[in-house]
Amino acid sequence: QQPLLLIAGPCVLQSQDLAFSIADRLAAINERADVNVVFKASFDKANRTSVSAKRGPGLQEGLRMLEEVHRYCGLPVTTDVHLPDQAEAVASVCALLQIPAFLARQTDLVVAAAKTGRPLNVKKGQFMAPEDMQYVVEKVHASGTGGVMLCERGTFFGYGRLVNDMQSLPIMRSLGVPVVFDATHSVQRPGGLGGATGGNREMVEPLARAAVAIGIDAVFFETHPDPETSPSDGPNMIPLDAFEPMVDRLLRLRAACGEIMA
Amino acid sequence: QQPLLLIAGPCVLQSQDLAFSIADRLAAINERADVNVVFKASFDKANRTSVSAKRGPGLQEGLRMLEEVHRYCGLPVTTDVHLPDQAEAVASVCALLQIPAFLARQTDLVVAAAKTGRPLNVKKGQFMAPEDMQYVVEKVHASGTGGVMLCERGTFFGYGRLVNDMQSLPIMRSLGVPVVFDATHSVQRPGGLGGATGGNREMVEPLARAAVAIGIDAVFFETHPDPETSPSDGPNMIPLDAFEPMVDRLLRLRAACGEIMA
Amino acid sequence: QQPLLLIAGPCVLQSQDLAFSIADRLAAINERADVNVVFKASFDKANRTSVSAKRGPGLQEGLRMLEEVHRYCGLPVTTDVHLPDQAEAVASVCALLQIPAFLARQTDLVVAAAKTGRPLNVKKGQFMAPEDMQYVVEKVHASGTGGVMLCERGTFFGYGRLVNDMQSLPIMRSLGVPVVFDATHSVQRPGGLGGATGGNREMVEPLARAAVAIGIDAVFFETHPDPETSPSDGPNMIPLDAFEPMVDRLLRLRAACGEIMA
Amino acid sequence: QQPLLLIAGPCVLQSQDLAFSIADRLAAINERADVNVVFKASFDKANRTSVSAKRGPGLQEGLRMLEEVHRYCGLPVTTDVHLPDQAEAVASVCALLQIPAFLARQTDLVVAAAKTGRPLNVKKGQFMAPEDMQYVVEKVHASGTGGVMLCERGTFFGYGRLVNDMQSLPIMRSLGVPVVFDATHSVQRPGGLGGATGGNREMVEPLARAAVAIGIDAVFFETHPDPETSPSDGPNMIPLDAFEPMVDRLLRLRAACGEIMA
């Protein structure tokens, strides 16, 4: 059984100190043999519900902060790319490039990211069938050799609600690529807070357990020492103090599944 | 950790011999300490897509066959009730009464079934929110003391497809009742065969693993020695020879989860 | 152009006087040459969300009240049938039998209703594709010669919300049967009031206009002199004083469409 | 009653001659007093399902062709913008800028387009509630004075299918902006052709009639002299020979509605 890839961090880069304090905890988790941790944070929240919502430090400053995190804790870092011309710069710092779900069909973005040679983590659009991610995989393979992972982060299920079709995990894996489960965005409630996205943090661990039991290669979480103060995604983030115990339970579950299914 | 309740059997009663041969295997599984098995089969498929589809032996003959199964193997038996005036007769033979998903909102049926004093297994309607099953629970509690379980069996997700909202399991459990996961009906594709319901059997075990990992009290499967010959639900049934190994894996997974979450 | 069939009335039978006062208005509308009115009211709300919700006068008293309405105003009457053994009695009073959407797949109910020889109005289940209503039509044709209309009343669209797929109207019409648009139930919000169904009356006329413009044979509305006092469906009913002007606008729209499409 | 805004053209710019031949027909329609026509064609299909699908002539050549169309027939032209840095160039040629549905939440794109001072036509994301378009309107108003229209083009409704929630038209209009109905994209079947998007052209006019009857300010169609040869969206386009008669019927319907609702 391969170690689980754990992609985690605050939603958005707020301050270097905050990033370091989260990186400390993630580096401690990375000591385990059964997990490889990648630090994730966004430099820009490019699709906020409201025009007045905070967005992040921007590309240049954000990449500088991510590079500091990498230097500080040694973990590889990742972030999301929103425009084709950001791909090169992001790839110079990040070991993995993330394509947002709303942008999963934008050919130029996927191609530019793939051309950097870095592996991609493409989130399945909330409006896409898992089968149709095949064409995204083809776009990546036609453009670079870094490879691609596909990520389940919830599908449109009536206004204001997402659902995880757990069948998407084996379906996307059958396309020949690793699959990721994004446990914190899956519990979002779009528009649920009036001008902001709500969420339900209590469902994060049950859904992550379900995904691990089905079989995934990577899992994605947002975590924060004080989620209520996060500029975005607070309602669905895992408090940092609860994070390591939860990860421990998931890794033990994964090990048990590996033995049972062997 | 309570033993898992395993509700299983052929979809519909075909012949006494077939019922016995399935009951043999279920009785063997029931020897385990970590599981309690209930034999399930329908006496009537009351909502077949097509008017010319086979329906089953009917109430009287069906109950006679179920009684024979109980006498033969000692397992408690259950079946689904479609009309209020069937409840009494069914309760005279069955230890558990099942309310079909399409009928979950029919007050008289739920009340008549509850009044028998038997526990009910009510399937959440494909058109219902898990939160709204609260009112079904109240209908049962207002009418009898046998108790009620709520069952996730898939929710409408566009024409011809169902999705399991796995959040429904903790949501329905928070209503103070045991929850069941119906793994074989969840993979149905309504209308998928043109005049009949299709399905995808390969997804049954992954979804059942997900549900067990989240935490359920009971699981429901249809199984048949030769699913292709079943008058209904063939495409989503588990072949009998594959059934016990699958149940074994799920029970080991459940035990592992119990230890991890303890 | 055939006259439009207008099926209308209070949701549930409350008192004979109330039924008469609504029937008076409907009989006045029926004077027009471009419309045929059928008075509709339920004798039993058999699938109320809550067990403590009011249900109606019951079969016997309800049929007596409907018969009085017919005698009083001369309009044909219709009501919904919930159990196979109600069909005969209902057919002795009603010119048209309605099958509720939740019960559209219950073969025995559809067959029993069809066997009375009366025409049926079957509502498409919230969980059904319009194409799959073909099998319901076949069930009716196999069982009686009274004919069948199919009714669009909204499809599940995430928890607590329905959507009208307006494509369902031509799709169901292509099955060779008249189609009905149920304008008031289409705006229901299931569970929207906590233990009761909410609704949004302001959307009734826009949706009815859309359906008329596409082409329908019949339209269904619930109306009440004081919707807030109705035991059910108040939030989506049309106040009686606003009813005739709205019907007038729809009939003028239908006439215009007839000329344009001729 | 204001004239209807009719946005129409081929899906993508293929050749100057083809554009001219479609523009000829549109210019003829524009002679009517009850309609204002805008010629629309894309210079780039930036989100094709497959990486090998044809995309169009690109920004520079596409804008040159659109400018030629405008010079040739005098109609204002519009096209869709995919990246913020395309907005200025597009605004130098186009009287109206279109934001694609997948990109409706990308703040920088909406802001850059609004800053050009041109009015925008923002398509509601397939993953968005109509109410939540309020925040898009705010993004536009905070960034420019050109104004904004909102466009219904279908909402996710299970894999491979879209639905028009016709309630979205009055809901978006209640945000104080004109609303557009995109009749040809609404009938798309995503992934329906295996590696390409399918569609059902026969539903275009019924849906357009429904939207006109509810009340819209603008309507959007793709049309082509020979849809089967179009590099994209062929299955849902209206053949050019059928276009003017259809538009005539819709304008007569709109006039009739205007009189009836006056």
Image: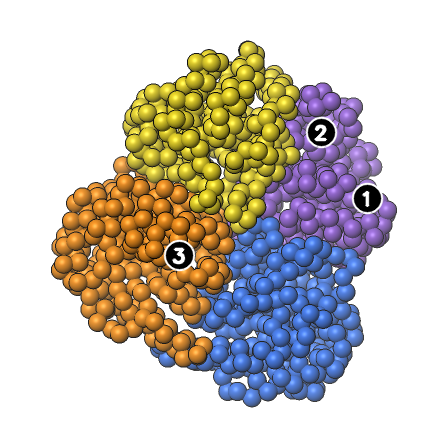
Chain colours: A orange, B blue, C purple, D yellow
| 3 and 1 marks in contact (CB < 8 Å) | no
In this picture, is B110 found above or below D122? below
Judge the density around disc 3: few (<14), some (14-19), many (≥20) Cα neighbours within 10 Å. many
Residue beneath the point at 43% across and 41% down: D47
Residue identifier under label 3: A150
Closer to the camera in the image, C132 or A261: A261
**Image location of residue C57, percent across then percent down:** 71, 50
Q: Are marks 2 and 3 in contact (CB under 8 Å)?
A: no
Residue drawn at x 49%, y 77% as measured from the top left: B250
Q: Kindly report the distance in space between the C-alpha atoms of the residues bearing marks 1 and 2.
A: 28 Å
Q: Nearer the viewer, mark 1 or mark 2?
A: 1
Residue under label 1 = C147
Q: Tell which subunit mark 1 falls on.
A: C
Chain on which label 2 sits: C
Point out residue C93 in the picture as x, y percentages from the top left corner: 82, 45
**Spatial distance from mark 2 to mark 3, Cα to Cα?**
61 Å
Left or right of C166: which side holds D153?
left
> Where is the C terminus of chain B found, in terms of image quarters?
bottom left
Please state the horizontal and vertical placement of residue C131, each as a whole percent of the image. Answer: 68, 47
Return the mark for residue C123.
Answer: none
- Labels 1 and 2 positioned on one and the same chain: yes
Q: Residue at x 58, y 39 (%)?
A: D199
Which residue lies under the disc numbered 2?
C25
